[in-house]
């Protein structure tokens, strides 16, 4: 089936195809084993055609943006990785309504909108993923979430139909959306509703927040961003610190001493090293505080 998919993908000139491509090259944690097939569709139409092809040939697949918030295992992925940030990467502005492809960078979009005087995305200016990923997990910061600016989302459903979901249908809650209950649905694009604002003020807010993150977070090291969700009434970083886990390490993986809700790759970590650090933190916090720490980081290609 892989050979037939490769023949169809290349024959239809849908984009770039790589074999046995290490996912460590495409995740912000810089870990992950090779994908049997890794593709970068040319554009939106090619992306949709690629999804339909992998389904036609009944191949396992994963849609990948910038690989943030993802812990890919060290094992071979016997399937197809379909990357979005080269294919569905477009922005169309119509007054305060912005149509954006799922592969657009959160950071870049926030800055681009600021430059044209559109406010409302300052909160994602430090989230190192794509809009598709932000929608999937209802990403948020500074007491705002992506649900606050979403008007509707275009998806390819499990019947290969393109259809729009409005804000109410997306079932947003804290770090959740309808897509976690429907993993076969693929986010194609979204329409955001922003607000008119002063360009210099918006850019100053983004700059100020970046400076604060540089001081408070280990942005110089590979990570997946925040590792754990905040349990009700608690700050995840404080629970980790108060449990004596600051700096805890396994191999090349380590709880950051700068911000304890970050597990970092100190240079030579394996995915298993990172996974073991996460498990240890969860076990210790439950032992000491009887609180369950739920991952913000998605596990991919693990057998748990």
Image (cartoon, grey):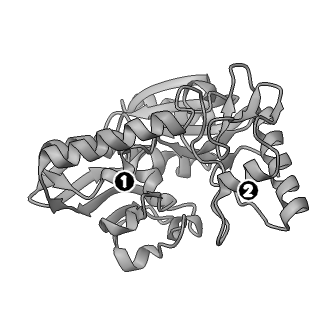
Residue depicted at 65% across the width and 47% down the height: 261
Q: Which mark is residue 123?
A: 1
Looking at the image, is 288 positioned above or below residue 4? below
Residue depicted at 70% across the width and 37% down the height: 78
- Corner quadrant of residue 217: top right
Left-right relation of 61 to 279: left
Q: Nearer the viewer, residue 281 or 299?
A: 281
From the image, state whether disc 1 or disc 2 is nearer to you: 2
Measuring from the top left, give residue 33's x and y in whole percent. Answer: 70, 29
Q: Is residue 88 visible?
A: no
User: Are the residues tagged 1 and 2 within 8 Å (C-beta)?
Assistant: no
Q: Which mark is residue 249?
A: none
Q: Nearer the viewer, residue 196 or 157?
A: 196
Specify few, some or many for label 2: CA neighbours under 10 Å numbering under 14, 14-19, or 20 or more: many
Q: Secondary structure at mark 1?
A: helix
Q: Secondary structure at mark 2?
A: helix
Q: How far apart are the two marked residues, 1 and 2, measured between alpha carbons?
A: 24 Å
Left-right relation of 159 to 30: left
- Corner quadrant of residue 95: bottom left
Measuring from the top left, give residue 117's x and y in whole percent. Answer: 12, 50
Looking at the image, is 31 positioned above or below residue 90? above
Q: Nearer the viewer, residue 210 or 103?
A: 210
Q: Quadrant of the N terminus?
A: top right
Specify few, some or many for label 1: CA neighbours under 10 Å numbering under 14, 14-19, or 20 or more: many
Measuring from the top left, give residue 152's x and y in whole percent. Answer: 31, 68
Looking at the image, is 52 positioned above or below residue 6? below
Q: Which mark is residue 239?
A: 2
Q: Earlier in the sequence, mark 1 or mark 2?
A: 1
Left-right relation of 45 to 242: left
């Amino acid at each position: 089936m892989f050979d037939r998919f490769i023949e169809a993908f290349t024959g239809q000139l849908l984009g770039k195809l790589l074999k046995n491509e290490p996912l460590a090259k495409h995740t912000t944690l810089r870990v992950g084993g090779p994908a049997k097939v890794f593709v970068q569709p040319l554009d939106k139409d090619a992306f949709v055609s690629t999804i339909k092809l992998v389904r036609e040939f009944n191949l396992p697949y994963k849609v990948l943006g910038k690989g943030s918030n993802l812990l890919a295992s060290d094992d071979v992925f016997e399937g197809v990785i379909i990357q979005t940030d080269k294919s569905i990467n477009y922005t169309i502005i119509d007054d305060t309504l912005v149509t954006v492809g799922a592969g657009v960078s959160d950071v870049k979009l926030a800055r681009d909108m600021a430059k044209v005087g559109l406010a409302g995305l300052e909160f994602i200016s430090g989230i190192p993923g794509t809009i598709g990923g932000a929608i999937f997990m209802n990403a948020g910061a500074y007491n705002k979430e992506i649900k606050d600016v979403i008007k509707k989302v275009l998806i390819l459903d499990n019947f290969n139909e393109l259809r729009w979901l409005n804000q109410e249908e997306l079932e947003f809650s804290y770090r959740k959306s309808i897509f976690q209950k429907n993993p076969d649905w693929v986010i194609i694009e979204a329409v955001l509703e922003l607000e008119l604002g002063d360009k210099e003020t918006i850019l100053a807010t983004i700059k100020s927040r970046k400076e604060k993150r540089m001081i408070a977070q280990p942005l110089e090291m590979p990570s997946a961003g925040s590792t754990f969700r905040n349990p009700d009434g608690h700050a995840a970083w404080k629970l980790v610190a108060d449990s004596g886990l600051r700096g805890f390490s396994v191999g090349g993986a380590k709880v950051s001493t700068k911000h304890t809700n970050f597990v970092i790759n100190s240079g030579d970590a394996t995915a298993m090293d990172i996974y073991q650090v996460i498990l240890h933190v969860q076990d210790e916090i439950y032992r000491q505080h009887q609180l369950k720490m739920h991952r913000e980081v998605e596990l991919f290609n693990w057998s748990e």
